[in-house]
Amino acid sequence: MADKRYNVLVLCTGNSARSVLGEALLNHLGQGRFKAYSAGSQPAGTVNPYALQTLAKHGIATDGYRSKSWDEFGVDGAPQMDFVFTVCASAAGEACPLWPGAPLRAHWGLDDPAGVGSNDAEAMAAFESAYQILHRRVAAFVALPLGELDKAGLLQRLQEIGRL
């Protein structure tokens, strides 16, 4: 299990801000051990420019991110997920598709930075705050000894991480 590459899906309703930050952080901090994706139940259609600016500010590549439906990950040929994390309350409460392979799920909710603030500085501060929360959670997740934890222990740790 130590050499296994884990697929992770980060979900939110619009897939324009928090879930994209989570996807980027998992791919960046996971150093090839994780392949992250993001999606939404009702995708906005575009990635919030403040999300991309926040990633760039931290030296994380911003190419290739797009707002997409979670339906893309429930079809034949889609990557089989090992983990599914919801980062907004509405996505956590929605009836998600049945993911092949029955991935472990956890809720890592945080406030939506999109639409916060009346100017660029306030908006960037909201995105920076969301980035920092997700960074702490993702760093804790990628540091877990996944091959050493049983399913119940791992689920407990994932839920604890969601409270960081």
Image (cartoon, rainbow, N blue to C red):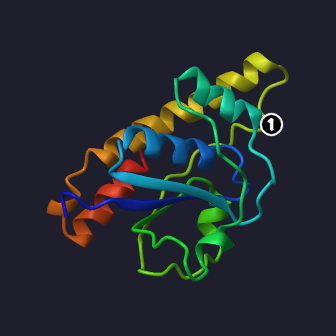
Tag 1 secondary structure: loop
Q: Which residue is drawn at the image coordinates 54% and 56% (left, top)?
A: 37
Name the quarter where the C terminus is drawn.
top left
- Image coordinates for residue 157, horizontal then vertical, percent: 29, 56
Say if 127 sits above or below 108 in the image. above
Q: Nearer the viewer, residue 65 or 21?
A: 65
- Image coordinates for residue 3, horizontal then vertical, percent: 22, 58
Q: Which residue is drawn at the image coordinates 74% and 44% (left, top)?
A: 47
Residue farthest along the left direction in this orientation: 148
In this figure, which residue is indicated by the disc labeled 1? 115
Residue type at numbered disc 1: Gly
Horizontal arrangement in the rendering, residue 148 relative to residue 83 (left or right): left
Say if 114 sits above or below 11 in the image. above
Mark 1 crowdedness (10 Å alpha carbons): few <14, some 14-19, many ≥20: few
Q: Nearer the viewer, residue 29 or 10?
A: 29
Name the quarter where the N terminus is drawn.
bottom left
- Image coordinates for residue 147, horizontal then vertical, percent: 18, 62
